[in-house]
Image (cartoon, rainbow, N blue to C red):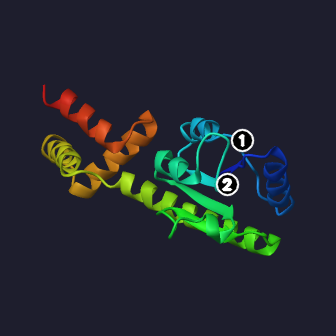
């Protein structure tokens, strides 16, 4: 689920946008009047979408965007004359007056983009480094040599042991090397 933060300098504007999103089935995680509060929430979450006006009570949207963590996206709702030349990276603009259809469709598109980015980050974190691969290969070689296992059997042994012990394969390989190599 994407964290949605609605941030406008006027409470009634923020409540109006929050209500439109809620009626469309989107859960708003926070409503803020200041950029400082947005940043406070953003620091506790991995990613999300900030829906905001061009100026909050304490900072313009450009300053907020500069201070937001990279995985966060921003949807700026303002009249186009408030946009400085072109929008910064990570900012999508919707012109005022806002149409509910445009807001909902844009938010759905942004949430799909966040979901794809999240899956890519997760896949990247699963890739093993060369050092980790070497450690696992050394553990398999040791199991093959000492226990007469094939490479597939040694690999299955490490997998099964890691699942049973609740550790990842790298940690299991290190334990095998420590226990059998001493």
How far, Cα to Cα, is label 1 from label 2? Answer: 9 Å
Q: Is residue 26 left or right of residue 172?
A: right
Image disc number at residue 58: none
Q: On the image, numbered disc 1 is attached to which residue? A: 33
Tell which residue pokes out farthest to the front in this image.
Answer: 81
Circle 1: element type: loop
Crowding at label 1, few (<14), some or many (≥20) Cα neighbours within 10 Å?
Answer: many
| Quadrant in which residue 114 is drawn | bottom right
Q: Position of residue 134 (x, y in %)?
A: 16, 48
Q: Which residue sits at x=64%, y=36%?
A: 37
Crowding at dot 2, Cα within 10 Å, few <14 / some 14-19 / many 20+, comes out as many
Residue 110 coordinates in the image, percent (x, y): 61, 66
In the figure, is residue 143 to the left or right of 40?
left
Q: Position of residue 92 (x, y in %)?
A: 58, 67
Marks counted in the figure total 2
Per the image, label 2 sits on a secondary structure element best described as strand
Residue 109 visible? The answer is no
Where is residue 57 drawn, in percent x and y? 67, 41
- In depth, the one of 79 and 127 nearer the eye is 79
Q: Is residue 104 visible?
A: yes
Can you identify the residue that label 2 sits on?
52
x 59%, y 58%: residue:
74
């Amino acid at each position: 689920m994407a964290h949605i933060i609605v941030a406008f300098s006027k409470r009634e504007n923020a409540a109006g946008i929050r209500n439109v999103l809620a009626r469309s089935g989107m859960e708003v995680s926070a409503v803020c009047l200041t950029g400082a509060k947005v940043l406070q929430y953003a620091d506790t979450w991995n990613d999300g979408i900030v829906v905001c006006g061009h100026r909050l009570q304490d900072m313009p949207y450009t300053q907020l965007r500069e201070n937001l963590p990279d995985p966060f996206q921003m949807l700026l709702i303002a009249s186009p004359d408030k946009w400085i030349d072109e929008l910064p990276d990570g900012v999508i603009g919707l012109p005022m007056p806002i149409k509910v259809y445009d807001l909902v469709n844009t938010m759905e598109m942004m949430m799909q983009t966040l979901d794809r980015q999240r899956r890519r980050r997760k896949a990247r974190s699963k890739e093993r480094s060369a050092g980790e691969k070497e450690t696992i290969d050394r553990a398999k070689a040791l199991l093959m040599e000492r226990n007469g296992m094939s490479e597939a059997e040694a690999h299955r042994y490490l997998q099964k042991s890691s699942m049973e012990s609740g550790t990842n394969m790298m940690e299991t390989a290190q334990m095998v090397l420590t226990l059998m190599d001493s």
